[in-house]
Amino acid sequence: MDKTDEGPLLALRSIRDSFLLCHIDAFEAKRRLSTLGFRPRSARLVLHLWIEDEIAALHDIEWGGG
């Protein structure tokens, strides 16, 4: 990955972390994603995927993976 790709990637990670740590709500997360070029429907899908990924990770921790 070259340096030009790091800005948007860091911004995306920052939005994800803020959302998952409840520092921002879903409306603010979708607004911030739109500034990165995500359409509203795509932004909503991204939020759902982040939540599903967190639930899967917590399930793996609690139940030992698999």
Image (cartoon, rainbow, N blue to C red):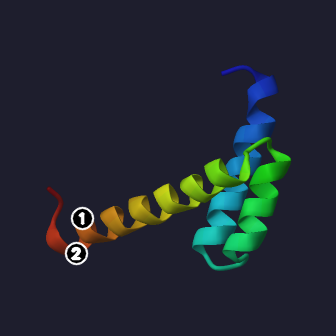
Q: Is residue 65 above or below residue 62?
A: above
Residue 33: image location, x then y, percent: 75, 53
**Residue with the most extreme right position:** 35
Helix, strand or loop at label 2? It is helix
Residue 59: quarter of image: bottom left
Task: Give the residue at x 15% y 66%.
Answer: 64
Residue 54: image location, x then y, percent: 42, 65
Query: Would residue 1 appear left or right of 59 to someone viewing this image?
Result: right
Nearer to us in this view, 33 or 19: 33
Nearer to us in this view, 62 or 53: 53
Query: Would residue 23 appear left or right of 61 to someone viewing this image?
Result: right
Q: Which residue is mark 1?
A: 60
Residue 8: image location, x then y, percent: 77, 39
Task: Give the residue at x 63% y 64%.
Answer: 17
Q: Is residue 18 above or below residue 43?
A: below
What separation in Å lies between label 2 and label 1 (alpha carbons)? 6 Å
Please tell me the numbered disc located at residue 12: none
What's the amino acid at mark 2?
Glu
What's the amino acid at mark 1?
Asp
Residue 26: quarter of image: bottom right
Query: Does the residue at mark 2 contact the one at mark 1 (Cβ under 8 Å)?
Result: yes
Query: Would residue 21 appear left or right of 55 to someone viewing this image?
Result: right
Nearer to us in this view, 50 or 44: 44
Task: Give the residue at x 80% y 38%.
Answer: 7
Helix, strand or loop at label 1? It is helix
Residue 53: quarter of image: bottom left
Q: Which residue is mark 2?
A: 62
